[in-house]
Amino acid sequence: MWFTSVTREGSLDYSSSSLEIINPRDGFVYLSGRGIGIDEIPVEVTGGESSILRVTHNGRQFAVSRPFIFFLPYEAGTNILRVSNGSEEQTITFTVE
């Protein structure tokens, strides 16, 4: 019970780390097909100075707030994922076969 009886406070300093796409990694190849059972690509991005992430996936744009974890639809072929946050930007490509 000692763990639950103590009040803990703190904050994360997101701006201390550079913007990075953790998943998927650049060059990943995803297989799609009967029996595989996955119909979305999980995305995780860390770092950045702002609490809003601007995302462009194959030309479509949207925004995500922290934590930067979201899913993209499977789209056959080469996929381009670009994320930007403050003055930082990262771009990767991955393939769905």
Image (cartoon, grey):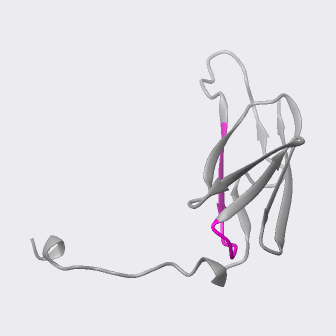
* Residue 33 falls in image quadrant: top right
In the image, is 69 to the left or to the right of 25?
left
In the image, is 33 to the left or to the right of 35?
right
Q: Quadrant of the C terminus?
A: top right
Q: Nearer the viewer, residue 1 or 65?
A: 65
Q: Nearer the viewer, residue 71 or 32?
A: 71
Relative image position of residue 29 (x, y in whole percent):
80, 40
Magenta residue span: 41-51
Relative image position of residue 92 (x, y in whole percent):
85, 55
Q: Quadrant of the N terminus?
A: bottom left
Residue drawn at the location 73% of the way across and 67% of the way down: 20
The answer to whether 2 is drawn above or below residue 41 in the figure is below
The answer to whether 75 is drawn above or below residue 34 in the figure is below
Residue drawn at the location 75% of the way across and 31% of the way down: 74
Relative image position of residue 84 (x, y in whole percent):
80, 63
In the image, is 1 to the left or to the right of 81?
left
* Residue 88 falls in image quadrant: bottom right
Q: Is residue 95 magenta?
A: no
Residue drawn at the location 67% of the way across and 62% of the way down: 52
Q: Nearer the viewer, residue 60 or 79?
A: 60
